[in-house]
Amino acid sequence: MNNFCSACGSPLSADARFCPGCGTAVHFVAPSAGQATRQLFRPLYDRRIAGVCAAMSRAWGWDIGLLRVLTVICGIFLFPLTEIVYLACWIGIPEELPAPPLM
Ligand SMILES: [Zn+2]
């Protein structure tokens, strides 16, 4: 989740207000404090095949039922493109870690 300066391309930290490279004011909308960055994780439960649909629906707030239907439809009509993308997501999206036991 790197931001880059629009003027010189230097990488910026998430809370940067000015570019360390050229001093340009940074004009991206910083997430407000306490708002966690939504990341893709394949949940351990609520999955059908590999949890790819569940990960996307959780991260982006999409309807999981609709997403699964679309995935199946695309899987039929765009074969094998959807299957390749799905496999890439399966490999690329990290699996959610089980919650640590409460002490
Ligand atoms: Zn810059």
Image (cartoon, helix red, strand yellow):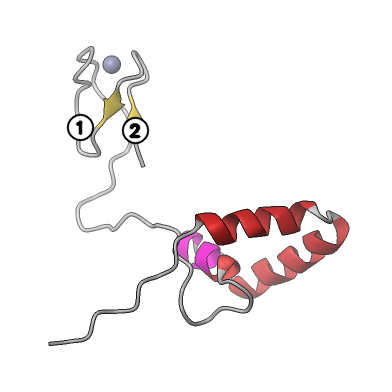
Whether the residue carrying mark 2 lies under 8 Å from ligand 1 is answered with: no
The secondary structure that dominates the magenta segment is helix
Residue 16 shows which numbered tag? 1
Quarter of the rendering occupied by the N terminus: top left
Identify which residue is drawn at 73% across, 64% down.
Answer: 70
Query: Mark 1: which secondary structure?
Result: loop
Q: Splitting the image into 4 quarters, where does residue 84 fall? A: bottom right
Check residue 59 for magenta coloring.
yes
Q: Which amino acid type is shown beneath numbered disc 2?
A: Asn
Q: Position of residue 71 (x, y in %)?
A: 72, 64
Residue sitting at the far left: 103
Which residue lies at the image location 87% right of the left edge and 58% below the top edge? 77
Residue 91 magenta-drawn?
A: no
- Using the image, determine if residue 85 lies above or below residue 11: below
Figure check: 18 above or below 31: above
User: In what element is the residue under mark 2?
Assistant: strand
Which of the two discs, 1 and 2, labels the residue nearer the N terminus?
Answer: 2
* Magenta segment: 55-60
Q: Amino acid at mark 1?
A: Ala
In the image as oriented, which residue stretches furthest toward the front? 91
**Residue 79, horizontal then vertical, whole percent:** 84, 56
On the image, numbered disc 2 is attached to which residue? 3
Q: Residue shown at 33%/22% (left/top)?
A: 5
Mark-to-mark CA distance, 1 and 2? 9 Å
- Dividing the image into 4 quarters, which one contains the C terminus? bottom left
